[in-house]
Amino acid sequence: MSSRISRAGARIVSLLPTRADLAEMGRAPRRDLLAGLTVAIVALPLALGFGVSSGLGAAAGLATAVVAGALAALFGGSNLQVSGPTGAMTVVLVPIVAQHGPGGVLMVGLLAGLMLIALAALRAGKYMRYVPAPVVEGFTLGIACVIGLQQVPNALGVPAPEGERVLVVAWRAVAEFAGAPNWTAVGLAVAVAVVMLVGARLRPTVPFSIVAVIAATVVVQVAGLDGAKPIGDLPSGLPAPSLSFLEPGALGALLAPAVAVAALAALESLLSASVADGMTVGQKHDPDRELFGQGLANIASPLFGGVPATGAIARTAVNVRTGASSRLAALAHAAVLAVIVFAAAPLVSKIPLAALAGVLLATAVRMVEVGSLRALAKATRSDALILVLTAVATLALDLVYAVIIGLVVAGALALRDVAGQVRFDQVPLDRGDHSDEEHALLAEHIVAYRIDGPLFFAAAHRFLLDLTEVADVRVIILRMSRVSTMDATGALVLKDAVEKLTRRGVLVLASGIRPGQRQVLDSVGALELLRHEGREYATTPEAIRAARGHLEGAGLLPALRGGEDGPHVCDE
């Protein structure tokens, strides 16, 4: 017991920041601080917008960006990752708010944080890399569509209609707008989105989101425009830590949403960290430390009224492009946002909701990588199907179901392709030193088959069908040296085939069974069956000699003149 505790303690210690991390932050502080300031300017409208979209308000988005952003930067596994509220997480949170209220969202964030720490302790970070690219791209496309639809009520200047499905809510908002148009809100949203999209093409390094939001706020205040509803009052500072949202009786109902939030936080954070690695030279994130940092961030964020957080791809990309080289940049981003919370809350509260809607509409458009979508759609039909199916499921169902559906379909199609690679080919017996007549006598009674590829559940039954249809032979030799892998189903099917052929009077011999396949064959009794009467041989020539001896003993073949070795077949 003590050794287990010590190993667990050592594992946790290995996830904590090191002296090297702290030393790295002192190498280029000026560049990192400038990058952090730039990211904070970009992150401010996004944090406000995602807070509003989540249903907990702009203050919750700011609290998340400050608290989660700082903790994830300090304890995470990437030197360049920037964390905070994201669009993907907002999509998951909206139905949770509708069903369980704000307290439910905060409780879900806390539970998700604990789950992320557990995943880090179990070293699960490495498994996230196995999510197929079409699932990720379809997931991102679906999220972009959902984020865009979520902004329709604020962009049209109408109260958010009741409902959990974004398509239904957006349609109801359009119907309400048609009855009482609010062109001020529409103009602000469209103007902010256009400025961001056009500006990003002309001057990618300029944070046009904050420029557009400030301009929209000034215009509304100076012109006194009606129909531009502001964010509303924001607290001057972060609320004191509180556990008032804890409701033990609601834990059972919140476990499933917490699993969804933890899975999304892990997937999006590790994907974002991988993007950061790809944009730099010499940077490599630690996936388990990243999960640990995100876990701590999601535990702390709810205590200050924040929502669940993840690594943010867009903000991380800005961080890298502006020259960040250490965690100091992400910490500076959180510090700048904290100063805004404490010093500029009255000014921030006057930002029109329609302007934030424009920011998120432009963000949704920029999330869609048309080139990547086109490439995947042209790659294979399977990739295109997975991409479209994941995107549609994200839009029609929710993110967790979408990812599960995408993974299941991708796995099924991959299994189909792998199963199609399994080959069961008859191979000729080499003539060796024997005459044509002697070789013809052997070939009349003995047939050898070579199995190439994995013998597993997806391909095993086709193998059984092909093998048991063999007719008019007395001995079958199965050359198994090229079987790459075998599962219990494959072993059972092999055993079934041997038993069926034996009942028909056909002797089945096997050669070249690999050591890794013996355990699974032995577990189902197939190895014992093959060993019965010496049916299993190390090499194919040995199996052929045994087959010849069996036929001679049965009086089906005369003693051959070619010597003891008989026909020779080389094992590959």
Image (cartoon, rainbow, N blue to C red):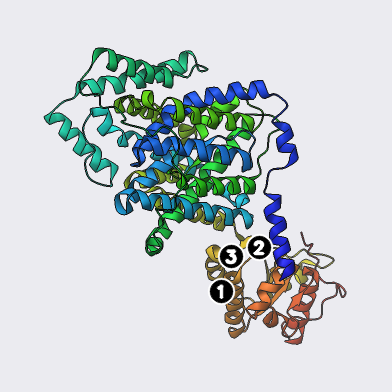
Q: Residue furthest right?
A: 563
Any part of residue 219 in sight: yes
Q: Nearer the viewer, residue 484 or 465?
A: 484
Give the numbered dot on residue 301. none
Q: Kindly state the secondary structure of the residue where label 2 is placed.
A: strand
Q: Nearer the viewer, mark 3 or mark 1?
A: 3
Q: Kindly state the secondary structure of the residue where label 1 is placed.
A: helix
Three-letter amino acid code at disc 2?
A: Thr
Residue where numbered disc 1 is placed: 468
Q: Which of the two discs, 3 and 1, labels the residue nearer the N terminus?
A: 3
| Image height of 539 relative to 11, above or below | below
Q: Which of the two discs, 2 and 3, labels the residue nearer the N terminus?
A: 3
Residue where numbered disc 2 is placed: 485
Give the numbered dot on residue 456. 3
Q: Nearer the viewer, mark 2 or mark 1?
A: 2
Position of 104 with respect to 415 (left or right) is: left
